[in-house]
Every structure is written in C-alpha cells, then in structure tokens.
Amino acid sequence: MIKRSRAISYLVITLISVIVLFVLLLVLQFVFHNQIADEYHLVFYGILIAIAGVLITNFSADILSRTTRNLAGQSTAGTMNFTIKLIGYIITAVIFFSILKIDIGAALAAGGFAGLVLGLASQDVLSNIFGGIAVVGSRPFKVGDRITVSTWQYGLDAPAYPPKFYSNDFLIPGYTGVVTNISLMYTSMLTDDNVPLKIPNSIMIQSAIFVHGVNDSRLVRTKFEVSKDIDPDIFIPRAYDALKSLDFIKGRLQVRIYETTFTSYVIVVEALCKGAYEEPPRSEILKILIKLSKSMPKS
C-alpha cells in the first residue's frame, strides 16, 4: 500500500511538472511573441521535451523495476531500471537535438576547440556510462550480491604486521558490502559497516571483484594458542572430535600445529563452514577450544 501511494505521488508530481512547464512556455510565447524569434521557440520546445523526457523516463523505470522486483527478484529489477533509463535518455536526447535541428557530429567538427574541450570534459561521464553498460552486460556481479571491491584507485592502508593469532596471513584491501543499485554513473553499495558507498562505474570495470556467497560456504581459519604444558597429541584429537559435531561445518576440517613460541604452541583449525561470513563460525570454534584447553590436564 505504501509503495502504491508513493508511485501515485510520483506520477502526480511528474504530470504537474510537465503541465507547469508547458503552461510556462505558453505564457512566455504569449508575452514575448513579437520579441522572440522562431528559433528560440524551438529551444523552448526542446527544453520542455528534454525535461519531460527525463521525468517520464525516471517514473517509468521506477514503476517497471518495482513490478519486476516482485515478479523476478531484485537483480532483474536493477537491470531493468538501468536499461530503461539508458534507452529513455538516449531517445530524449535524439528528440531534443532533432527539434533543434542539430547534427551532433557536424556541430563537434565545426566547433573546433570548443568541441575538443567538450569532449575532454565529458570523458569521465562517458567512461562511467560505458562502464555501467559493461557491468550490466557482463554481469560480474548483480544487485543483491555481497562483494569486495579491491582497486588501486582508492588506496587503503593495511597494517604491515597484523595481529599474530587473530588475523589472516594476508589482507585484501577493499570495500565489502551488498550491491544495492547499478545506475548510469555509479554502482551503489551498503557496506558491512552499514554506510552507503557509491563507486564510479569506470572504476568498477577495472577492479578486482570478490563475490561472496556464490558457493554458500567459505573456508574459515582459526588460530589458537595453547600452553606447552598441554600435550598436543592429546589436545588436537580431542579438539577435532569436539569440532566435527558443529552443524555449520560442511566438510573439510583440519586441526594442526601452526607455529610455536617459548611457552606455547599455536594450532590452526581449517573448516569449510556454511554462510558468507567467517566471524560467527570462528566465534563458536574459539569457544570450544577455550573450554577444552581449560579442561585439559597439564604436565
């Protein structure tokens, strides 16, 4: 009901905007009829058509994408929204230049320096648009996917020496979150920190994309420090028996010594766990290891 009322409100606003623009154009023509040349009448009509075209395109894209979301899912709706807006803007631009009787190629060729400046100024805009087309066409990811974007354009400082027992041996600098929209200019994400993020499409097609959740499982590595007073030949088999009963472990499970210190040894647990996140299963694994280490006899 709320979505329907929003759609009706959007439709009413669009119609009112078009009507107001049309009335304004008629008033200007009536007041300044003898002072405005015929060429400027075409400009007024062109501006009216351009604004109306953008409003109608946005309204149509939103309505159809919402309908598609209910029928075919969020990913298909995002692609539908992008495609409709792209086609609508192209048609609006063609009609606008046709009303003004402007040949785009001839105008740029005759413009000389002005055409060169315009081309350079629109380079980033066009690269983002073509980048969006490439993303939607090749579909390396889709709306609703949880991804990590790693790119050299946006530097992230990783610690030179990560915490010894509680981090991976290597770090992937990047932005992780759920894709919420793919527009003509930007790919929008909601990061794991619940912060909206917009990345230009020209950056997305050059980035390394890690798509999480494709196989509905991931390998989780957990490191745990054990006192040398506890015999590893006893602790490791008991840890394996305690961990293999966890319902989120799907298959691979290994428990082995990773390294040693003067007073302890470090074991690593490698387990193929259900889900796209590694923190929840790691937490449960650590709980079992902590309880087990406290119950073990010491020599």
Image (cartoon, grey):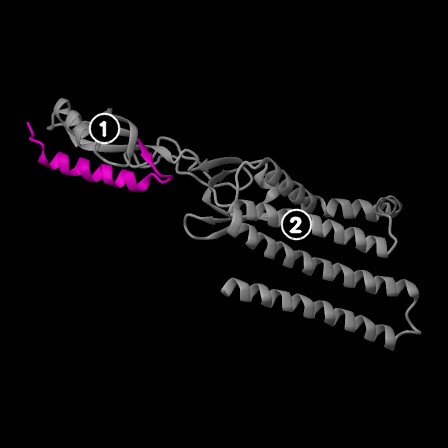
Query: Which one is closest to the eye, mark 1 or mark 2?
Result: 2
Residue 26 is one of the magenta-drawn residues: no
Question: Secondary structure under badge 1?
Answer: strand
Left or right of 74: which side holds 267? left
Left/right of residue 138 with respect to residue 44 in the rendered view:
left
Instruction: Report the Cα–Cα distance between label 1 and label 2.
Output: 55 Å
Residue on which the image places disc 2: 84
Comparing 58 with 197, the one in front is 58
Residue 294's place in the image compared with 265, above or below, is below
Q: Assess whether residue 278 is covered by the magenta stretch.
A: yes
Residue, far bottom = 31
Residue named by callout 1? 267
Q: Residues within 10 Å of mark 1 (few under 14, many from 20)?
A: many
Residue 122 at x, y = what percent?
A: 72, 47
Task: Identify the amino acid type marked 2.
Answer: Ile
78 in relation to 218, above or below:
below
Q: Of all residues shown, which one is farthest toward the top?
A: 233
Q: Name the residue at 78% across, 73% down.
A: 24
Q: Amino acid at mark 1?
A: Ile
What span is colored magenta in the figure? 271-299
79 and 119: which is toward the camera: 79
116 or 176, nearer to the observer:
176
Give me the residue at 80% from left, 55% from top.
Answer: 96
The residue located at (50%, 36%) in the rendering is 209
Q: Earlier in the sequence, mark 1 or mark 2?
A: 2
